[in-house]
Image (spheres, rainbow, N blue to C red):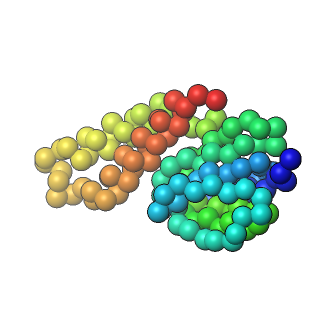
Amino acid sequence: MAENIILEVVTPEKEVVNEPTQMVMAPGSMGEFGVLNGHTPFMTSLKTGTIRYKDESGNERYVFVSGGFAEALPEKVTVLAESAERRSDIDIERAQAAIERSEKRLSDERSKEKVDFIRARAALERAKQRVVLVGTRV
């Protein structure tokens, strides 16, 4: 049996995950990547999406991340994310309300001059990713 690799996911506010895992899959800015124990070291930026990993028992776990960076070392993956939350901590009603708010901002003709479209689109993408993640079956 292969040895485990440590996954650490942290934000400026808190540590979200710090545990041994069998495997880590993450949304790199150039595409999804996977890491097992003994992987060649590398660093990459992350896009908004889901980190999937198998815990020591082989159960698949999920963590939403919004941007940041990942460093893979032979025995550890460290993710420094702008924001992150475990699937179980996502408030689905709040995410759906954020989708509605963002879509309204982006479609409101009267406020087009005041809306920061980049921020509104990013908020919409984050909210959609949260809703998709909560809909994922374990």
Disc count in the image? 0
Closest to the observer, 124 or 24:
24
**Residue drawn at the location 86% of the way across and 47% of the way down:** 1
Closest to the observer, 38 or 28:
38
Residue 82, image x, y percentages: 55, 60
Residue occupying the far left of the picture:
109
**Residue drawn at the location 62% of the way across and 51% of the way down:** 25
Q: Quadrant of residue 114?
A: bottom left
**Residue drawn at the location 82% of the way across and 43% of the way down:** 56
**Residue drawn at the location 18% of the way across and 44% of the way down:** 108
Vertical placement of residue 4 versus 38, above or below: above
Residue 54, can we see it? yes
Horizontal relation, residue 6 to residue 88: left or right: right
Horizontal relation, residue 62 to residue 57: left or right: left
Residue 71, image x, y percentages: 65, 67
Residue 9, image x, y percentages: 68, 56
Residue 8, image x, y percentages: 72, 57
Residue 14, can we see it? no
Residue occupying the far front of the picture:
1
Quadrant holding the C terminus: top right
